[in-house]
Amino acid sequence: MGGYFGGRLAVAGEEVTFIARGKHLQALRGEGLRVNSVDGDFAVHPVSATDRPADVGPVEAVLVAVKTWQLLEAAAAARPLVGAETVVLPLLNGVEAASRLSETLGREHVLGGLCRIIAEKVGPGHIRHHGAEPYVALGELDNRRSERAERLRSAFAGAGVRVEIPDDIHVAMWEKFLLIASVSGVGAVTRAPVGVLRSLPETRALITQAMREILVVARARGVDLAAETVDRALDFIDGLPPEGTASMQRDIVEGRPSELEAQNGAVVRLGREAGVETPVHAFLYSSLLPMERAARGEAP
């Protein structure tokens, strides 16, 4: 996410510094950033990149685009980037990133945010955008209109990214959560691409029930998701490339630590807190937990 959206902003003329490490950082500094996209390839060279945020200092905006299990480490590392006027935008899966960032960096700096895109890092300095129209939503956590949110919206729009400030950013974040947690969990359990998941009546029904559980949890927690949210999410799934897979699904299949706790695990936990049963997500979480623990070296 950071490579794609940061790259688009850099190509559009925005001053962008990438915070990276290891081989990815070396590639960015040496060969630059390369993005293969269904919408047209692009590259950024030279690239401003570092693994020392303190060398950058306070910036206008910080885009946080890490895996959810890396969020606390990233938030702590981002402290030198946050000045009095800095705004922090999380582009992560799940619905708890903004509150986690607020605890470390201060709620006054943090926006709500989300993105939609099917993309992955295929090698150091190399991003591939497989499908789904790149989209960003952002907004103040109290849903007021602000100049800083509008400036950031304008920057994305100037980079050719479809972007909006929704009336209620919390509704928008839960709408995405309803979609991605359901597809990720069912995809990881079945190891099937989205074209199969949406076409087979049994897996389509499983995804639909998983979405309905999240709808009930959201409403129980005071987020007013509309009844048609599930239908819209299914329509979105029907428009994805059939070979598409979710990032959590790919991580679990390939034996890497994943966002299981922030997706299906979070549905179960947040549902329990709200007094809502979530049997589908409990099944998905329990089924995937052994692989998640093994990937983290925690298997008994």
Image: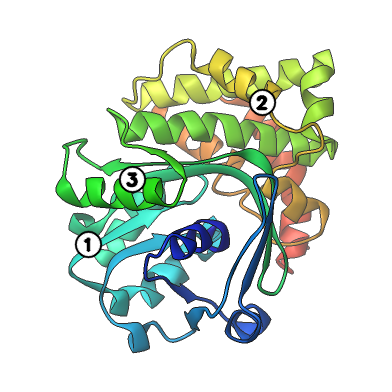
Amino acid type of the residue that numbered disc 1 sits on in the rendered structure: Gly
Q: Residue at x 25, y 76 (%)?
A: 58
Q: Position of residue 14 (x, y in %)?
A: 37, 65
For the N terminus, give its image quadrant: bottom right
Of the residues shown, which amino acid type is indicated by label 2? Ile
Cα separation between marks 3 and 1: 13 Å
Residue 204 visible in this rendered orientation of the protein = yes
Tell me which label, 3 or 1, sits earlier in the chain: 1
Which of the labelled discs sits on residue 112, or is there none? 3
Q: Nearer the viewer, residue 297 or 39?
A: 39
Which marked residue is nearer to the observer: mark 3 or mark 1?
3
User: Which residue carries the number 1 mark?
Assistant: 106
Q: Which residue is mark 2?
A: 237
Residue at 81 percent of width and 28 percent of height: 195
Question: What element does badge 2 sit on?
Answer: helix
> What's the distance in space between the residues labelled 3 and 2, CA to CA?
23 Å
Q: Is residue 90 left or right of residue 193?
A: left
Quarter of the picture containing the C terminus is: bottom right
Residue 142 position, x and y percent, is 19, 38
Closest to the observer, 193 or 136: 136
As rendered, which of 200 and 210 lies closer to the eye?
200
Q: Determine whether, in the image, residue 154 is placed left or right of residue 191.
A: left
Picture quadrant of residue 16 = bottom left
Residue 25 at what x, y percent from top left? Answer: 59, 81
